[in-house]
Image: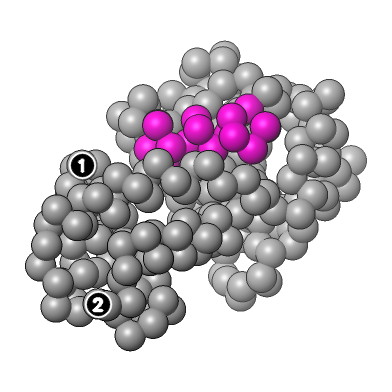
Amino acid sequence: MVKKYKHVYFDLDRTLWDFESNAEETFEEIYDKYKLNTIFPEFAIFHETYKKHNQRLWKAYRDGKLKKQILRNKRFELTLEEYGNTDPALAEKIGDDYITLSPAKTRLFPGARETLEYLYERYNLYIITNGFNEVQFAKLKNCGIDNYFNAVFTSEDAGAQKPHKEIFQHALKNVNAKKSESIMIGDDLESDIQGSMNFGMDQIFFNPNGIPHDSKPSFEIRQLEEIKTIM
């Protein structure tokens, strides 16, 4: 029997909310709406080009080297520019649409709702996320899982992003939680697992694709419903 936890902190994107599926559906709508087939040879190339630029810019944002508003549009500007389009107005429209459309998507990982139902009756549940406020709160509400969480802690409100300890301190302090009674569940080895590990809090690494790694989380799962066997 593992030690008794009282407070369970979840990451949102790629842990509960199926980011990849929801994002791809959103990008397909944007691709059709703006006739991006006139710029890109095919949808897959547009999507992969965006992901390349977004990943690099998100790292800069997470490291405090890039402002939120710059990130929102720059990732699309660079994507369009790579295929010869230099229209910043189009990039801004796409950026605005993405922020509006993506939170309306409601696909969760298998077992997410059932796992939350199980945990809700036994623990205090929270979200810790690096995502934008206006997007993350909308995702939770539109998916109908916002009612499971006592509080949502975003990097914008905390003034720090995972994996930095300040966001974990902020989340625990606000609900008077002790590290020894808390656990973090997330898919990102650096942000969620190493971040909470460095902070001194137990972790559950959600690794649905079985990606090899050298990290040593407190627990590791392939399916969310495995959490029930841990807690």
In this figure, which residue is indicated by the disc labeled 2? 39
- How many angstroms separate mark 1 from mark 2 (CA)? 24 Å
- Left or right: residue 75 versus residue 195 is left
Q: Residue at 65% across / 51% down in the picture?
A: 107
Place residue 149 in its image quadrant. Answer: top right
Residue 213 visible in the picture: yes
Q: Which amino acid type is shown beneath numbered disc 2?
A: Ile
Place residue 205 in its image quadrant. Answer: bottom right
Residue farthest toward the bottom in the current orientation of the protein? 41
Residue 113 x/y as whole percent:
77, 40
Is 145 colored magenta in this rendering?
Answer: yes
In this figure, which residue is indicated by the disc labeled 1? 69
Judged by its main secondary structure, the magenta piece is: helix
Q: Nearer the viewer, mark 1 or mark 2?
A: 2
Which of the two residues, 201 or 76, is positioned nearer the viewer here?
A: 76
Which of the two residues, 124 or 98, is positioned nearer the viewer here?
A: 98
Q: How is the image coloured?
A: one colour
Is 89 colored magenta in this rendering?
Answer: no
Q: Residue at 88% across / 47% down in the picture?
A: 229
Q: What stretch is highlighted in magenta?
A: 128-146
Q: Residue at 29% across / 54% down in the picture?
A: 94
Which of the two residues, 36 or 207, is positioned nearer the viewer here?
A: 36
